[in-house]
Each structure stands twice: as structure tokens, then as C-alpha cells.
Amino acid sequence: MFQRVPVLTIDGPSGSGKGTLSRSLAMHFGWHFLDSGALYRVLALYALQQHCRYDDVRRLVELARSLPVIFLDEQVILNEVDVSLTIRTEDCGSAASTVAVIPEVRKALLDRQREFAKLPGLVADGRDMGTIVFPNAFFKVYLDASAHERAKRRYLQLKRAGYNVNLHDLEADIMQRDERDKTRAVAPLRPATDAMIVDTTDKSIDDVFAIISSEAQRRLSKF
Ligand code: DC
């Protein structure tokens, strides 16, 4: 018998806490997890490896359709190579944001993202999960935080991972990326009209998790 798949979408700008929250929620409910940003990051990296320019739309679409990527728990494998750390650099994030502007590229990645929606459920993390990819999600969340707070979080995250970074440059980069993500013509970063908006600037991860998980549970009982 056909069973509907519950999809919980978490959208928002980088550094809003989406990644940590989405993973924790997926673990908590025992659901699948889609890190859509990683998909755009992997595509940008793959294009670089294949010497494909970011303005060569036809080729980028081909690469997006044939992207040899596998997601294994926390690991991202591209062409049998673990690129989990490589795709997390600011350069790769910025390149991802550049390819993500192209409507044909976004379209080419749509089905791939929708395939993640399998029972018992899915937590999908991104920018347009609730607006475009999973418009019928049972619960849509939009996380936000000030650019300064997000830069600070990113700074600590990258420092811990051993990268030499500068807070001021990070904040400038985040603001530039926000602007590009919010003003692009296709699937701009914005909350779905039926999303619950949570500002995480002054909240701990635990506080945000408690708010979202209990609301998800409440809605699930009616799903
Ligand atoms: O979430 P992230 O920082 O890993 O995403 C990297 C870039 O990918 C981000 O700047 C914009 C793009 N992206 C997107 O356009 N749509 C998504 N659903 C996820 C990411």
C-alpha cells in the first residue's frame, strides 16, 4: 500500500545552524538526511576537476546529471574519493553558490534531491527545500541569525577543523553569498509562506532542537 513519506525541511542561510540541527533531527527520528548544499558543493568541485568553466551551462548540466557522488553517513564520496573535507572550504562554498544561480543546473539536481524522500522519513537541509524541492513537506522550518553571529560560528568551526581563517573576511564573504543566494532569479533563499521562522542568534543548538523536535512530533501525530 502507498504510504506518504513525512518530509521535514530546514532552510536558511549558511551558518544559521541548519546543518547541525538537521543531522540531529534525522538521527532523533531515525530518518534519511539530505544535505542539498553538499550536492551543489560537490558539483562545483567536480566541474573544477573536469576543467569545466562555471559559465559553461550545457557542460555543467551534463556533469550535474552524471555526478558520481555517494553520501555515506557523514562522508561524501566523489568518484570513489572522500571529499567530505575538501567541499567544506569557503572557496568551494562560494563556487557552489555560483553554480547554484544557474536555473538549468538547479533543475538537473531536482530529481536527485527528491529521490532522498523515502520511508520512514526525510530531513532536508538547504535553501529551497520548503519552497521548491519539497513543497508538500509536513513541516517547514526557516532558520536565521545575524550575519555577524553566523560568521563567528563559521570561524570557530573552520578553526577547529585546522583552517587558518579571518573573521572579518568570513563575515564579508557570508554577506556576499547571502546577497547572491537571496537575489538570484530562480529559487532564491526565502522562507516558504507556511514555514516556521526561528531566529537562532541568541539560542543554543539544544534550545533550537527542543523547539523544532517537539513541534515536529506534534505535527507528526496528525500526519
Ligand atoms: O549550505 P551550504 O553552505 O553547504 O551551500 C552551499 C551553496 O549552495 C550556497 O551558497 C547556495 C547553494 N545552495 C542552494 O542554492 N540551494 C540549496 N538547496 C543548497 C545550497
Image (cartoon, helix red, strand yellow):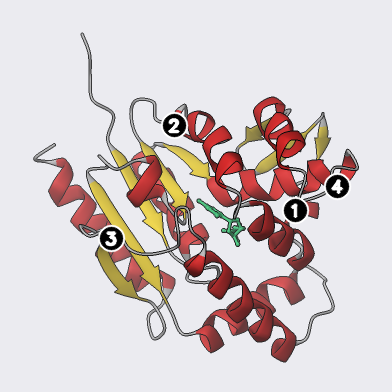
Q: Secondary structure at mark 3?
A: helix
> Residue 50 placed where, x, y %?
88, 38
Q: Secondary structure at mark 1?
A: helix
Q: Nearer the viewer, mark 2 or mark 1?
A: 2
Image quarter (top left, top right, bottom left or bottom right) of the N terminus: top left
Q: Which mark is residue 116?
A: none
Q: Distance from label 4 to label 1 (Cα)?
A: 12 Å
Q: Secondary structure at mark 4?
A: helix
**Mark closer to the chain start, 3 or 1:** 1
**Mark closer to the chain start, 2 or 1:** 1
State the image quarter where residue 26 is shown.
Answer: top left
Q: What residue is rendered at 50% in x and 41% in y?
A: 34
Q: Amino acid at mark 3?
A: Ile
Ligand 1 is in which quadrant of the figure? bottom right
Q: Amino acid at mark 2?
A: Arg
> Residue 163 placed where, x, y %?
82, 72
Task: Report which residue position mark 4 lands on.
Answer: 48
Q: Distance from label 3 to label 2 (Cα)?
A: 22 Å
Q: What residue is rendered at 23% in x and 51% in y?
A: 216
Q: Amino acid at mark 4?
A: Leu
Task: Report which residue position mark 3 lands on.
Answer: 212
Q: Nearer the viewer, residue 77 or 189?
A: 189
Task: Report which residue position mark 1 lands on.
Answer: 87
| Residue found farthest to the left | 222
**Mark closer to the chain start, 4 or 2:** 4
Q: Distance from label 4 to label 2 (Cα)?
A: 25 Å
Task: Report which residue position mark 2 lands on.
Answer: 114
Q: Distance from label 3 to label 1 (Cα)?
A: 28 Å
Q: Nearer the viewer, residue 124 or 207?
A: 124
- Say if mark 4 contacts mark 2, CB within 8 Å: no
